[in-house]
């Protein structure tokens, strides 16, 4: 049962501490849209999306009005398009991308995700064709998001796919150079990508999902920061308990919204993703939570330990609040979307290397990080490989969303606007891993992947 007292208390958090539902995401399977005729495939996709998600935005607005809970985004995720498109040519995949954008425009959703490929163990011709056209697809659309899963604990790391993604990211940056290389902000490279993630840019509707499903992503770092501040000078065990109880209340709101949305739309409720997703707004920062815990500045020594405790407490509180927790679930550390992270990066305390260490204990990975525009493909490949290996070895999801900002150098600033905020361009090591990348092949799966 939903505890009314908890909900009312959380409504107070909404008014004062920036709590919101970051997204209602409807996952829609496109398996029954498959056709060997590209035109018919596009027509099938458009028809199904506009039929299944016809009321998504209106239902989201009704729930906002009914409960007074802000729902920031209404989104759609679809079956990875490389699976649906099969042997389609790059040009046909571009037509599919534009069809997805057309459906997005018709429905009024904020983002549509799933222009994706799963290549952790190898690449089909269709996957290669889709990846080859990602830069153009993200340049010629507004709301489309793309992801590529290049590794898993079970399969190992596909280094050929990583090398391809370095080229893809550089081209996407170039094609949108007059718009701060914004296409790269809509592209993420994964290890162990979850099939029920409601957050962009990595959302897609996995092969084991139903025909349509509602997944909800909550937020609330401002709420947690306030709770930590109120707790005062208690010990870390007590502080962990405070965070757990706060995460429980936040997740209960997500459970309520997810259940209501699923009921109204007549589709199954999938999961609540209980990630602490920050925004550039003052008072809505994961970095500020860590600083309230006792750090002088996010990124200083001790940051990884504090983040590990925060992430664990959020998960423990969240799983008690919903029977179906999934997606990424934990704490996000996107540099451009978090006011505290931005400040820490601008003053040089938070570095790329420290962020990489932090990703071993948080939800996802190197997220929304601007790097110099002249960073080579091979260095980007190395950044991806390092981060992806953390996910593979630790049996967790990790990801990379970097923006080589065309024409920018370390110390400059890149403005994205909205929830994407702005990012200081962070320095990278320029020594090249080219010989390692050029070896190609797969890094084998770790020994602990053999669990059958």
Image: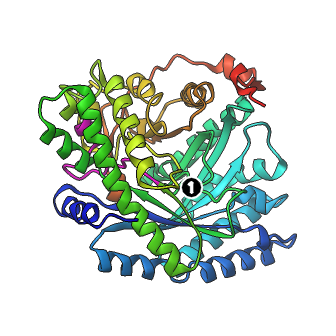
Q: Position of residue 326 (x, y in %)?
A: 53, 50
Q: Which residues are magenta?
A: 273-290
Majority secondary structure in the magenta region: loop
Q: Quadrant of residue 57?
A: bottom left
Q: Is residue 16 visible?
A: yes
Label total for image: 1
Residue that carries the numbered disc 1 in the rendered image: 203
Q: Is residue 284 visible?
A: no
Q: Identify the residue at image location x=41%, y=38%.
A: 369
Q: Position of residue 146 (x, y in %)?
A: 59, 54
Q: Position of residue 291 (x, y in %)?
A: 21, 32
User: Is 295 drawn above or below residue 225 in the view shown?
Assistant: above
Q: Identify the residue at image location x=34%, y=35%.
A: 310
For the N terminus, give its image quadrant: bottom left
Residue 411 in the figure: left or right of residue 192: left
Residue 350 in the figure: left or right of residue 202: left
In the rendered structure, does residue 128 fall within the stretch colored magenta? Answer: no
In the rendered structure, does residue 274 fall within the stretch colored magenta? Answer: yes
Residue 150 in the figure: left or right of residue 269: right
Q: Identify the residue at image location x=27%, y=28%.
A: 237
Q: Quadrant of residue 316?
A: top left
Q: Say what secondary structure mark 1 lies in.
A: loop
Count residues near mark 1 (Cα–Cα under 10 Å), then give few for <14, some for 14-19, many for 20+: many
User: Is 318 drawn above or below residue 290 in the view shown?
Assistant: below
């Amino acid at each position: 049962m939903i505890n009314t007292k908890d909900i009312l208390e959380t409504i107070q958090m909404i008014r004062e501490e920036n709590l919101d539902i970051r997204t209602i995401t409807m996952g829609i399977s496109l398996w029954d849209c498959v056709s060997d005729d590209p035109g018919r495939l596009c027509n099938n996709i458009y028809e199904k999306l506009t039929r299944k998600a016809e009321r998504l935005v209106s239902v989201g607005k009704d729930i906002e009005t009914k409960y007074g809970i802000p729902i920031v985004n209404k989104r759609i995720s679809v079956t990875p398009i490389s699976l649906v498109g099969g042997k389609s040519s790059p040009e046909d995949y571009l037509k599919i991308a534009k069809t997805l954008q057309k459906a997005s425009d018709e429905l009024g959703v904020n983002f549509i995700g799933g222009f994706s490929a799963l290549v952790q163990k190898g690449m089909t011709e269709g996957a290669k064709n889709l990846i080859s056209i990602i830069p153009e697809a993200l340049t010629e659309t507004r709301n489309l998001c793309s992801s590529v899963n290049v590794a898993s604990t079970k399969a190992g790391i596909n280094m050929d796919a990583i090398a391809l993604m370095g080229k893809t990211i550089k081209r996407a940056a170039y094609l949108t150079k007059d718009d701060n290389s914004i296409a790269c902000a809509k592209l993420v490279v994964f290890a162990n990508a979850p099939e029920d993630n409601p957050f962009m840019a990595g959302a897609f509707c996995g092969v084991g999902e139903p025909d349509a499903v509602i997944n909800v992503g909550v937020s609330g770092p401002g709420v947690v920061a306030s709770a930590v501040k109120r707790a005062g000078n208690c010990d870390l065990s007590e502080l962990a308990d405070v965070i757990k109880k706060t995460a429980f209340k936040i997740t209960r709101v997500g459970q309520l919204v997810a259940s209501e949305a699923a009921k109204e739309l007549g589709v199954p409720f999938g999961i609540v993703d209980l990630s602490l997703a920050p925004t550039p707004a003052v008072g809505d920062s994961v970095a500020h939570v860590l600083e309230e815990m006792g750090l002088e500045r996010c990124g200083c020594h001790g940051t990884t330990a504090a983040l590990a405790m925060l992430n664990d407490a959020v998960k423990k509180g969240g799983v008690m609040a919903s029977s179906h927790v999934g997606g990424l679930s934990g704490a996000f550390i996107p540099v451009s979307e978090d006011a505290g992270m931005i400040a820490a990066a601008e003053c040089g305390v938070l570095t790329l290397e420290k962020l990489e260490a932090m990703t071993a204990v948080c939800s996802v990975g190197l997220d929304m990080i601007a790097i110099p525009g002249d960073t080579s493909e091979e260095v980007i490949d190395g950044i991806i490989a390092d981060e992806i290996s953390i996910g593979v070895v630790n049996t967790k999801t990790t990801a990379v969303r970097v923006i080589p900002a065309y024409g920018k150098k370390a110390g400059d600033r890149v403005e994205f606007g909205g929830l994407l905020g702005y990012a200081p361009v962070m320095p990278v090591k320029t020594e090249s891993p080219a010989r390692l990348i050029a070896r190609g092949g797969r890094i084998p799966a770790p020994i602990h992947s053999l669990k059958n």
